Amino acid sequence: MDNSLALLEQKFEQFLVFCQSLRAENQALRSRVAGLENERQILIDKIDTARDRLEALMARLPEE
């Protein structure tokens, strides 16, 4: 009986360690996603700025 209880305790400890590692991985992934979303928005803004500048330059070109 004591052996079964010790085995159960060991498995429970392993489960808790596994859950902790999953929580840590999940938090790291959430941080990475937030950073990538921020980077994506910065790139979208740069593209929009470049588009606006190109449109302004094209408007200044003489027509043929």
Image: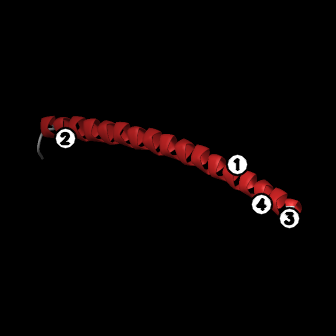
Label 4, label 3: how far apart the Cα atoms are:
11 Å
Mark 4 to mark 1 CA distance (whole Å): 14 Å
Density class for disc 2 (Cα within 10 Å; few <14, some 14-19, many ≥20) is few
In the picture of the structure, the residue carrying the numbered disc 3 is 1
Q: Position of residue 56 (x, y in %)?
A: 17, 36
Q: What's the amino acid at mark 3?
A: Met
Question: Label 4 belongs to which residue?
Answer: 8
Which element carries disc 1, helix, strand or loop?
A: helix
Residue lying furthest left: 63
Q: Nearer the viewer, residue 32 or 51?
A: 32
Query: Which badge, 4 or 3, comes first in the chain's sequence?
Result: 3
Contact, mark 2 vs mark 4 (Cβ under 8 Å): no
Does label 1 or label 2 sit earlier along the sequence? 1
Closer to the chain start, of discs 1 and 3, is 3
Residue kind at label 4, given as amino acid type: Leu
Residue at the disc numbered 2: 55
Q: Amino acid at mark 2?
A: Glu
CA gap between label 3 and label 2 equals 80 Å
Q: Toward which corner of the image does residue 6 lie, by quadrant?
A: bottom right
**In the image as oriented, which residue stretches furthest toward the front?**
1
Q: Nearer the viewer's eye, disc 1 or disc 2?
A: 1
Q: Are marks 1 and 3 in contact (CB under 8 Å)?
A: no
Q: Residue at x 49, y 45 (%)?
A: 30
Q: For label 4, count other residues whose C-alpha is less than 10 Å away and answer few (under 14), some (14-19) or many (20+).
A: few
What's the distance in space between the residues labelled 1 and 2, CA to CA? 57 Å
Q: Marks 1 and 3: which is nearer the front?
A: 3
